[in-house]
Amino acid sequence: QVQLQESGPGLVKPSQTLSLTCTVSGGSITTNYYYWSWIRQPPGKGLEWMGAIAYSGSTYYSPSLKSRTSISRDTSKNQFTLQLSSVTPEDTAVYYCAEGGDYGFGSWGQGTQVTVSS
């Protein structure tokens, strides 16, 4: 079973770019037909899928976040990365990386709190 671990700064200033990395172990992010997603949960709200990168490197984004979101990968490190630009306090949330996409989700990271504040 794959394991995922998020890493990145816990505090980001408004208007800056949030950058998080997910390190995957126990499996390759290039394994056929697997997708790798970023999901967040703002305080007091439900889970929000942000986007995903496929085994092929293709990327998919939530329409509501597409203009500010970029997902990339480093296959040599078995990592994929989220960048969210022009953040506001409304982007404060627990951010998760997970294996999966439209077909459902399997393993999740433990989540990392990101606070947007000056």
Image (cartoon, grey):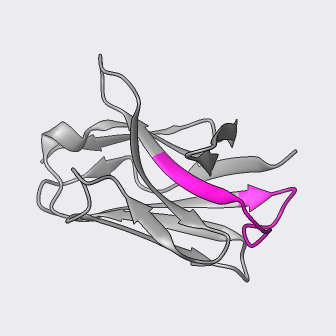
From the image, give the main secondary structure of the stretch colored magenta. loop
74 drawn magenta: no
For the point 52% across and 75% down, the residue is 58
Image height of 21 relative to 48, above or below: below
Residue at the top extreme? Answer: 44
**Residue 9, position as x, y percentages in the image:** 41, 54
Q: Which residues are drawn in magenta? A: 24-38
Residue at the bottom extreme? Answer: 76
> How many numbered discs sit on the rendered protein?
0
Depth order, front residue of 86/47: 47
**Residue 22, position as x, y percentages in the image:** 60, 58
**Residue 60, position as x, y percentages in the image:** 43, 63
For the point 72% across and 71% down, the residue is 78
34 drawn magenta: yes
Quadrant assignment, res 26? bottom right
- Check the picture and name the quadrant holding the N terminus: top right
**Residue 51, position as x, y percentages in the image:** 43, 55
For the point 62% across and 35% down, the residue is 110
Task: Report whether 5 appears left or right of 14.
Answer: right
